[in-house]
Image (tube, rainbow, N blue to C red):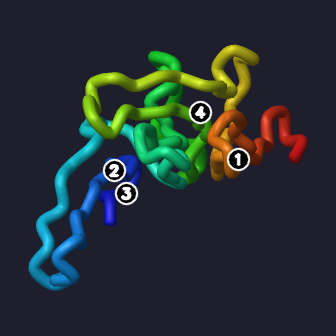
Amino acid sequence: VAPPGKPLFRNLYIMDTDSGDYLNANPTRLTKGEWNDSHCQWSPNGDWIVFSSTRDKPEGAPPLDNDLDPGYYAVFLVSVADPSVVVRVIGSREFDIAGHVNHPFFSPNGRSIVFASDMAAVS
């Protein structure tokens, strides 16, 4: 729980469970930063992870608005082989409005991504 007036940050982790020992598996951090990375899914071929994140929030945007997250979520891809490779897919910033572009999901063939959005308060 974050202190009042401070945002809570979340990052992505991968937990290798090939051994079947879920209790002793050590997670590996995939992303790191003062933002919220969430709603992640593996690509069908396993090379990419699609996720939503507040890392697209413009400088000067309030961390909270009436103690709520003001939005500025965007959809990104991160390479599983090289987590330094992060690709921005779409976000609310290009429309200069706060909003949530999240819940991304790959199509079965991995060639398309579907997502939800409330940009301009329209879902």
Residue in the foreground of this view, choosing between 69 and 117: 117
Q: Residue at x 51, y 25 (%)?
A: 56
Circle 4 residues within 10 Å: few <14, some 14–19, many ≥20: many
Q: Quick one: SS at disc 3?
A: loop
Q: Position of residue 117 (x, y in %)?
A: 77, 42
Going from N to C along the chain, the mark reached first, 1 or 4, is 4
**Structural distance between the alpha carbons of marks 4 and 2:** 15 Å
Circle 1 residues within 10 Å: few <14, some 14–19, many ≥20: few
The residue beneath circle 1 is 107
Q: Position of residue 121 (x, y in %)?
A: 85, 41
Q: Residue at x 38, y 39 (%)?
A: 35
Q: Amino acid at mark 1?
A: Ser
**Structural distance between the alpha carbons of marks 3 and 2:** 24 Å
Q: Considering the image in quadrants, where does the N terminus appear?
A: bottom left
Q: Which mark is residue 80?
A: none
The residue beneath circle 3 is 4
Q: Position of residue 98 (x, y in %)?
A: 68, 31
Q: Quick one: SS at disc 4?
A: strand
Going from N to C along the chain, the mark reached first, 1 or 2, is 2
Q: Amino acid at mark 4?
A: Ala
The residue beneath circle 4 is 74
